[in-house]
Amino acid sequence: MQKDPVCGMMVDEKKTKLTSTYEEKSVYFCSPACKTSFDKDPRRYKH
């Protein structure tokens, strides 16, 4: 399980298709809205 950096929800990285790569690390999201927020300004969110 990984923490969604936007909302803090725990996400099963094996099941979600909502991912981004930032600083050569995979980042996982619980919803398209969280992914969109992160992708707009990834430096805003620490993971």
Image: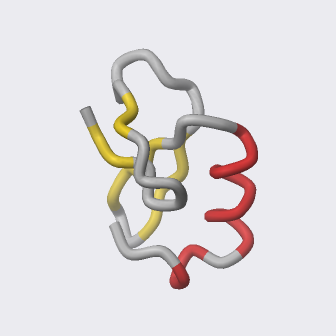
Above or below, 9 relative to 41: above
Above or below, 31 relative to 38: above
Colour convention of the picture: secondary structure
Q: Nearer the viewer, residue 38 or 23?
A: 38
Name of the residue lying farthest toward the left: 1
Q: Position of residue 38 (x, y in %)?
A: 62, 64
The residue at the point 48 percent across, 56 percent down is 21
Name of the residue lying farthest toward the bottom: 43
Name of the residue lying farthest toward the top: 15
Of the 4 image quadrants, the one containing the N terminus is: top left
Left or right: residue 23 compared with residue 29: left
The residue at the point 66 percent across, 78 percent down is 41
Q: Nearer the viewer, residue 31 or 41?
A: 31
Count of numbered circles on the image: 0
Q: Position of residue 27 (x, y in %)?
A: 42, 51
Q: Position of residue 35 (x, y in %)?
A: 65, 50
Above or below, 41 relative to 24: below
Quarter residue 39 falls in: bottom right
The residue at the point 38 percent across, 50 percent down is 26
Q: Position of residue 43 (x, y in %)?
A: 52, 83
Above or below, 12 relative to 26: above
Q: Nearer the viewer, residue 9 or 21?
A: 9
Quarter residue 10 falls in: top left
